[in-house]
Image: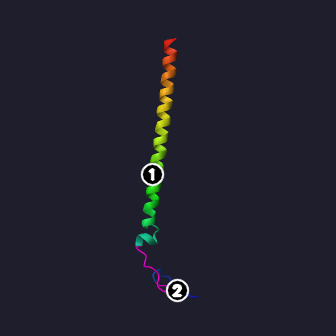
């Protein structure tokens, strides 16, 4: 079986024409990658939000502890 060096030439691929891939798709930067990147950005935003909430809670707890010690 002969393999072609040109990705758009289906020699030896068996089964007709292959979809012509854009340069971005050949470099694995196709539309699916944009969706993956959006999902990653959403996860990161959620993680940052949770970390900020924990930091605020820790600050509030530390603030209450220092208020308690100041009153005594």
Dot 1 or dot 2: first in sequence order is: 2
Would you say the residues marked 1 and 2 are in contact, meaning their CB atoms lie under 8 Å apart?
A: no
Q: Residues within 10 Å of mark 2 (few under 14, many from 20)?
A: few
Q: Which residue is mark 1?
A: 42
Label 2: which secondary element:
loop
Q: Position of residue 49 (x, y in %)?
A: 45, 42
In depth, the one of 3 and 49 nearer the eye is: 49
Residue 29 position in % (x across, y down): 44, 66
13 is higher (above) or lower (below) than 33? below
Horizontally, is 29 left or right of 12 in the view?
left
Q: Residue at horizontal 45%, vertical 63%?
A: 33
Q: Which residues are magenta?
A: 9-22
Q: Residue at x 44, y 61 (%)?
A: 35
**Residue farthest to the top, as pictured:** 72
Task: Give the residue at the far right of this rendering.
Answer: 1
Residue marked by disc 2: 15
């Amino acid at each position: 079986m002969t393999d072609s060096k040109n990705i758009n030439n289906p020699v030896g691929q068996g089964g007709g024409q292959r979809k012509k891939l854009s340069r971005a798709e050949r470099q694995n930067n196709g539309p699916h990658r944009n969706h993956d990147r959006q999902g990653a950005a959403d996860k990161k935003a959620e993680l940052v939000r949770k970390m900020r909430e924990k930091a605020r809670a820790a600050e509030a707890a530390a603030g209450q502890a220092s208020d308690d010690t100041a009153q005594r």
